[in-house]
Amino acid sequence: QVQLQESGPGLVKPSETLSLTCAVSGYSISSGYLWGWIRQPPGKGLEWIGNIYHGGTTYYNPSLKSRVTISIDTSKNQFSLKLSSVTAADTAVYYCGRVSGANSPGYYFDYWGQGTLVTVSS
Amino acid sequence: EIVMTQSPATLSVSPGERATLSCRASQSVSSNLAWYQQKPGQAPRLLIYGTSTRATGIPARFSGSGSGTEFTLTISSLQSGDFAVYYCQQYNNWPPTFTFGPGTKVDIK
């Protein structure tokens, strides 16, 4: 059973960089799949942040691209998110997930972490 | 950029009744459409992918249909555990991007 677990600071100051890590168990991320981040502001909908292939190729939401970096560490079986120059608008629950779809129309998130709330406040 | 819309925003349904949720894309997404269910305090759960394929463990009362720009999620007979928010999500082949709809909340009538 694939499991994902987000970790990182729950409070980040405005203008600083938000950093989160997603630890994966039950599957070796070096074996394949896309891995991604999604966020959800309190009481609002889901926003895709970006994905990374096991080989390191990344794809980002154009609206966040200038501030986002996603990286992968296959030796630790985890991937990470950095979001720079944060403001209160970046306050959200951040989810990590696995992307499937190589054998079907489209791609989708089939496994999700439980999510972690990050608040941007001084 | 592909924009996704969902209707209605809220759907009030009695247990045992049928629920029909709509999702529309601003341009064709072919069959690259998935549906998720989210309950309060929980991560979303994949229900349907490729427009109409149920994910592992999803009961047959959930079905998806459509193509191009118009998609539908049908819950044939609502059970108590089905009251939740439902999101559609499209995948764009190039550049490889994902977009979620704003969600439809299904609550008890």
Image (cartoon, coloured by chain):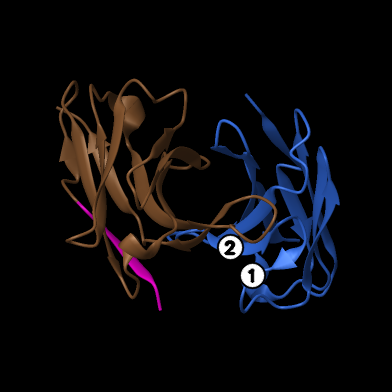
Residue under the image location 17 percent in, 35 percent down: A12
Residue A35 image point, x, y percent: 40, 52
User: Is the residue B37 above or below the residue B27 in the image?
Assistant: below
Check if residue A25 falls in the magenta segment: no
Under mark 1, the amino acid is Ala
Identify the subunit bearing mark 2.
B
User: Is the residue B44 above or below the residue A16 in the image?
Assistant: below
Q: What is the crowding at mark 1: few (fewer than 14 residues within 10 Å), some, or many (at least 20)?
A: some
Q: Colour of chain B?
A: blue
* A6 on left or right of A61: left
- The quadrant the N terminus of chain A occupies is bottom left
User: Is the residue A61 above or below the residue A114 in the image?
Assistant: above
Residue under the image location 16 percent in, 46 percent down: A9
For the residues labelled 1 and 2, the Cα–Cα distance comes to: 6 Å
Circle 1 residue: B55
Mark drawn on residue A23: none
Q: Colour of chain A?
A: brown
Under mark 2, the amino acid is Leu
Q: Which residues are magenta?
A: A1-7
* Dot 2: element: strand
Q: Nearer the viewer, residue B95 or A93?
A: B95
Check if residue A4 falls in the magenta segment: yes
Asked if marks 1 and 2 touch (Cβ < 8 Å), the reply is yes
Q: Earlier in the sequence, mark 1 or mark 2?
A: 2
Residue A113 image point, x, y percent: 37, 61
Residue under the image location 66 percent in, 28 percent down: B2
Q: Quadrant of residue B17?
A: bottom right
Residue B45 image point, x, y percent: 54, 63
Q: Is residue B105 visible?
A: no
Residue under the image location 70 percent in, 53 percent down: A105
Mark drawn on residue B46: 2
